[in-house]
Amino acid sequence: MQKIYLDNAATTPLRTEVIDEMVRVLKNDFGNPSSTHSFGRSAKNIVETSRKTIAKHLRCSAQEIIFTSSATESTNWILSQLVTKLGIKRFITSKIEHHATLHTVEHLAKVHNLEVVYVPILNNGNIDISVVSKLLEEPVKTAVCLMHVNNEIGTILDLKKMSELCSINKAYFFCDTVQSVGKTEIDLSQTPIDFIIASAHKFHGPKGIGFVYIKKSILIDPLFYGGEQEKGLRASTEATHQIAGLAKALDLSYLNLDEERAYISELKTQCVNLLKTIFPAVVINGENTFYNILNVSLPISEDKAAMLLFQLDMKGIAVSRGSACQSGSSRPSHVLAEFLSEEAIKHPALRISFSHFNTIEEIKTLIEILNQI
Ligand code: PLP
């Protein structure tokens, strides 16, 4: 049976070059980067060269990149530090953040008795920046935690505007850039953000490795104690092959960005056009959305809707209902629930997310099968 993977916002297939690089490191560079002999030095060199590659693409300094195991780990660490080390008294966030942010904020607010303000979402799925601007005029030590590209609907935060707003008002800005790193240019030398995060498996790299960018001037406490790795901020022997895989994946993503972005954008346009031919009343959720994420509500009856993902899966097609963490759940997506009307949310929503590995033939097959259901 053919298999068609259209769930690239959940995770992405690895590039062959990334696998090759990781295998090469696993075979040849097994040394512990903390060892002073040649095996250790060689492994250390891989870690530091990888850090420099990341810094080059994001236009920051290599010392500002700290490797972690995932975006969820980075989020938990940084949000906790904002409270316990940096002394914030209020979080400004939104109800359409990833649960890594939402649940961490909820937990910290409860334990430390902090204020949390959720910025309203406009009915096009975007953040109302004017509300953040008003809130930041209040004299409360604040961290703004808003994501760059939403993983369910693909709406995009104006990073420059938001970071400047935070900078002027002396608020910390933590931005979940998991869906945008490697998929769009991020120039940290021109954007006053305090923290961004990334996870390699979202840009054709391995799972279990990510990084956090921490602006140079900000001092925080370690996530783990017990070693000098990662400037003493995250002790434990570095996963050299994972780090090399991450850097290779990011490098290739940025080297091929223009070409792959144009290709994927065209796939998305074609998919929308074809969907409209079979469902003239299809609704696209979110406006001005990112080029690889398409979230649509389909005008089909509830009984058909219940079986939709299952039937697509039976035919070898992987798409998602809202976000991957919620598949199997019958609750509406927490993101769609935030800005769709009660009527609109009754229709089944599909998230179709593309990568450069997809083809127009695959999109046509998806449409044919949707048409049969
Ligand atoms: N933030 C966003 C926007 C995501 O899409 C994801 C993954 O689904 C995460 C955070 C969590 O990433 P990780 O799997 O690296 O913990």
Image (tube, rainbow, N blue to C red):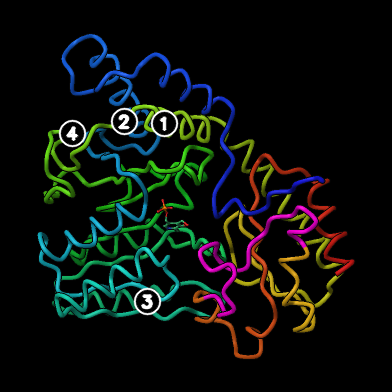
Beta carbon of the mark 3 residue lies under 8 A of ligand 1: no
The residue wearing badge 4 is 229
**Amino acid, disc 3:** Ser
Q: Quadrant of residue 239?
A: top left
68 or 299, nearer to the observer = 68
Few, some or many residues within 10 Å of mark 1 (<14, 14–19, 20+): many
Element on which disc 2 rests: helix
How would you classify the magenta stretch by its main secondary structure?
loop
Element on which disc 4 rests: loop
Beta carbon of the mark 4 residue lies under 8 A of ligand 1: no
Number of the front mark, 2 or 4: 4
Rendered image: mark on residue 51: 2
Q: Give the residues drawn in magenta, as a range.
A: 312-333
Left or right: 302 in relation to 52: right
Residue 104: where, in percent of width, then height? 29, 67
**Amino acid, disc 4:** Gln
The residue wearing badge 1 is 247
Residue 158: where, in percent of width, then height? 43, 61
Residue 198: where, in percent of width, then height? 39, 47
Q: Earlier in the sequence, mark 3 or mark 1?
A: 3
Q: Circles 2 and 1: CB distance less than 8 Å?
A: yes
292 or 32, nearer to the observer = 32
Cα separation between marks 4 and 1: 18 Å
Left or right: 105 in relation to 266: left
Q: Earlier in the sequence, mark 4 or mark 1?
A: 4
Q: Residue 127: within the magenta?
A: no
Few, some or many residues within 10 Å of mark 3 (<14, 14–19, 20+): few
Q: Earlier in the sequence, mark 4 or mark 3?
A: 3
Residue at image coords 50%, 81%: 338
Cα separation between marks 2 and 1: 7 Å
